[in-house]
Amino acid sequence: MWNEFKQFAMKGNVIDLAVGVIIGGAFGKIVSSLVADIIMPLIGLILGLGHVDFTDLTLGKLKYGQFIQTVVDFFIIAFSIFLFVKFLNRFKKKEEVIEEVKVDRTEELLTEIRDLLKEDKNILRKNETS
């Protein structure tokens, strides 16, 4: 049982997932700070409201302002992550294109080698029959 667990824990996918969770947590803090410290104050300046914070809005004991603030934060964070992933995918596509070019050239070279070998065999057969 211990060996099975060790094999599972040491697989690349599990380690990649762990790294992703840790980096995701750190990135989440960065994006939360971006929302709270930069984007929301800018929205307040643009709208002429000063500091925008919906958390103080209440209706008796119902804190609907906190919910509104959380929804606004979510959309800003989700959009920020979308832009970040889109930016990363742009680099990934460039790498894939480079790899495809290498593969295409390799296939060309292999085809040329095959054709040359066929020609050599044909030349050898002609020489043997002469």
Image: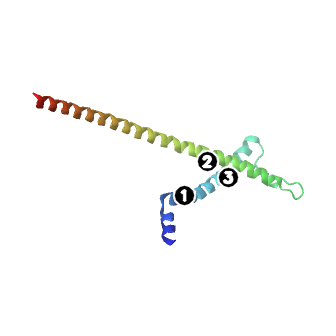
Mark 3 crowd level (few <14, some 14–19, many ≥20, 10 Å Cα): few
Q: Is residue 33 above or below residue 8?
A: above
Q: Position of residue 97 (x, y in %)?
A: 44, 38
Residue at the image position 22 percent from the left and 35 percent from the top: 117
Estimate the x, y position of residue 119 in percent, counting from the top left: 21, 30
Q: Amino acid at mark 3?
A: Asp
Taking depth in this image into account, of 79 and 45 the one nearest to the observer is 79
Crowding at mark 1 (Cα within 10 Å: few <14, some 14-19, many 20+): few
What number is the disc on residue 17?
A: 1
Q: Is residue 53 left or right of residue 58?
A: left
Amino acid type shown at disc 1: Leu
Which numbered circle lies on residue 81? 2
Above or below: residue 6 compared with residue 23? below
The amino acid type of the residue labelled 2 equals Ile
The residue at which mark 3 appears reads as 37
Which quadrant of the view contains residue 108? top left
Residue at image position (65%, 47%) is 78
CA separation in Å, label 2 and label 1: 17 Å
Residue with the most extreme right position = 60
Of the two numbered discs 2 and 1 on the same chain, state the one appearing first in sequence: 1
- Which one is closest to the eye, mark 2 or mark 1? 1
Q: Residues within 10 Å of mark 2 (few under 14, many from 20)?
A: some
